Image (tube, rainbow, N blue to C red):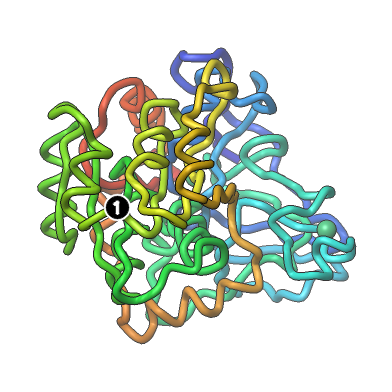
Amino acid sequence: MRAAVLREYNADLSLKEVADPRPEEDGVVLRTLACGVCRSDWHGWTGEHPRVKPGQIQGHEYSGEVIEAGPRAPWRVGDRVVAPFILACGHCPACQSGHQNTCPDQRLPGFVEPGAFAEYVAVPSSHNLARLPESLSPTLAAGLGCRVTTAWHALTGRADLRAGEWLAVHGTGGIGLSALLIAKALGARVVVVDVVQEKLDHARGLGADAAVNARDGDTAAAIRDITGGGAHVSVEALGIAQTTNASIECLRPLGRHVQVGMPVGHTAFMEINMNAVYVKNLALYGTRGMPSWRYPSLLALIEHEVVDFSPLIAREIPLTGASAELRAFNGPTPPGVAVITDFAN
Ligand SMILES: [Zn+2]
Ligand SMILES: [Zn+2]
């Protein structure tokens, strides 16, 4: 099959023919219909992600059609499915208690095992997959990627965002925009923060109640002003100290900070204003991914047109375009996500 392989950090992916994947006992092989390109891929591409090594086929935001199923896989040839980026074992105490995204035996196609920047992708532990509703395009399903699933779980599985509350969103990339769209559907009010005015304007167009350009000075003070005392919930979607502190400092007393951005490499250890955490009695949540059992609740929102996530998809690209998309994350990016939909070019 044709695949884009990480040959060397920060260099163009190498397009080449590699062996077709085979299904595991409980796994399937998918013909890749679409695969999103994500900042997490960029973390791997730059060498900052601790587990992504040269030789890796990246791509963890895929939808596909089953072309082969292992004997214990609950799928048939022709089924169209979407995957969470964390594939849980299904047997351990974490999985049994519903927290599959913390499974210690998780499998990670695109990070550790071959991913979906390729014509085909093997998916082990295929009980994690969710069937695509008829009305949901494979491109949008892939574009939901880790951003929408993570945002859905961050707001409803972790911080318990309620109607009428103020949500602050620091960083209006894919996760930030997903959080905005979900929060508006839940009846919350949303203030977005970014350094790219075009992205703030885009977020306003998608329903953000207020926007703060972080280049304009004290972001946290501006948010406390807009929200009449501070946000109830704040999502940090970048993984760096400056936005993490703005997130913590923009909260009202008893507010909830959710760390969605992935602090890796030089940002893994950061200085945080713990005095604000102490004085304001804040709660700090970490979150990563979504347990796969929550897919039906998320997909139902789309099927019943409660939330339209299509504005997240900025462009469809061929596999040859993946390198340029990764490189683009080196600087501030325009709004929206790129999704690979053509694996022959
Ligand atoms: Zn498990
Ligand atoms: Zn992702």
Q: Is residue 16 above or below residue 89?
A: above
Identify which residue is drawn at 80% across, 70% down: 97
- Residue 202: % across, % down: 14, 50
- Residue 341: % across, % down: 39, 51
* Residue 16, quarter of picture: top right
Residue 304 visible, this orientation: yes
Count the numbered circles shown: 1
Per the image, the residue denoted by label 1 is 230
Q: Quadrant of the N terminus?
A: top right
Q: Which one is in front, 243 or 35?
A: 243
Residue 342 visible, this orientation: no
Q: Residue furthest front?
A: 279
- Residue 142: % across, % down: 45, 57
Q: Secondary structure at mark 1?
A: loop
Q: Quadrant of the C terminus?
A: top left
Q: Is residue 255 left or right of residue 321?
A: right
Q: Is residue 221 left or right of residue 253?
A: left
Mark 1 CB near ligand 2 (8 Å cut): no
Identify which residue is drawn at 28% across, 44% down: 172
Amino acid on which the number 1 mark rests in the picture: Gly
Q: Is residue 189 above or below residue 14?
A: below
Q: Which one is in front, 61 or 105?
A: 105
Identify which residue is drawn at 87% across, 69% down: 71
- Residue 273: % across, % down: 47, 30
User: 10 Å neighbourhood of mark 1: few (<14), some, or many (≥20)?
Assistant: many
Identify which residue is drawn at 17% across, 49% down: 225
Q: Which one is in front, 128 or 200?
A: 200
Q: Residue furthest bottom?
A: 304
